[in-house]
Image (cartoon, rainbow, N blue to C red):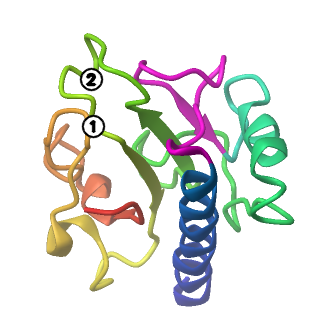
Amino acid sequence: MKARDDRRMMDLEQIRNALELYYNDNGYYPGAGATLSWDCECYSYSSDIRDDTWDIFALIMKPYIQTLPKDPLNTECVPWGGDGCYSYAYSFVGKSISPNNPNGVIQYDLTAQLEDPNSPYRCTIKDYRFFFDNISWCLSGDATYRGRIYEASPQ
């Protein structure tokens, strides 16, 4: 459990570093979701539960990261979808000003669910927040697994 959580955090740090390289070259982060678009609340998941967005995301990121990692367990659900939902999730909104991004903030979410309920990196300790609306990952919804979300994006 601890080894998988350590790998999750290292994987997301690698992705984060690649995203920053992408940003340095392009002035924005890559789109996400089914259409890999901007200005929507869309996600790409390593478990590919919605089309093949992670594979497309991997192609876009290829110049910056050779192989886009997937969660060690990579279950068929989103990290905040319930207890035991182990998948990486990436979302970006903010290439331009839009109804979902009225302030034109350039930011993203990059998350995973940790297995260890006592990890010092879990949401209940770090109070990670969605960049969309500043609501806490661990307080949105009523399930305790949300308290195990790990957020690798800049806060």
User: SS of the residue at dot 2?
Assistant: loop
> Farthest residue toward the top?
99
User: SS of the residue at dot 1?
Assistant: loop
* Magenta residues, dominant SS class: loop
What's the magenta region? 26-45
**Point 32% across, 75% down: residue:** 117
- From the image, tell me which residue sits under label 2: 101
Q: Position of residue 33 (x, y in %)?
A: 59, 26
Near mark 1 (Cα within 10 A), the count class, few <14, some 14-19 or many ≥20, is: some
Asked if residue 55 is among those painted magenta in the image, a careful observer would answer: no
Is 41 in front, or is 21? 21
**Point 43% across, 29% down: residue:** 95
Is 22 in front, or is 121? 22
Give amino acid for label 2.
Asn
**Point 60% across, 39% down: residue:** 30
Decide if residue 10 is on the left or right side of residue 128.
Answer: right
Decide if residue 155 is on the left or right side of residue 16.
Answer: left
Q: Is residue 56 above or below residue 20?
A: above
- Name which quarter of the figure residue 127 lies in: bottom left
**Point 86% across, 66% down: residue:** 66
- Name which quarter of the figure residue 132 lies in: top left
Q: Quadrant of the N terminus?
A: bottom right
Q: Is residue 118 above or below residue 113?
A: below
- From the image, tell me which residue sits under label 1: 105
Asked if residue 37 is among those painted magenta in the image, a careful observer would answer: yes
Near mark 2 (Cα within 10 A), the count class, few <14, some 14-19 or many ≥20, is: many
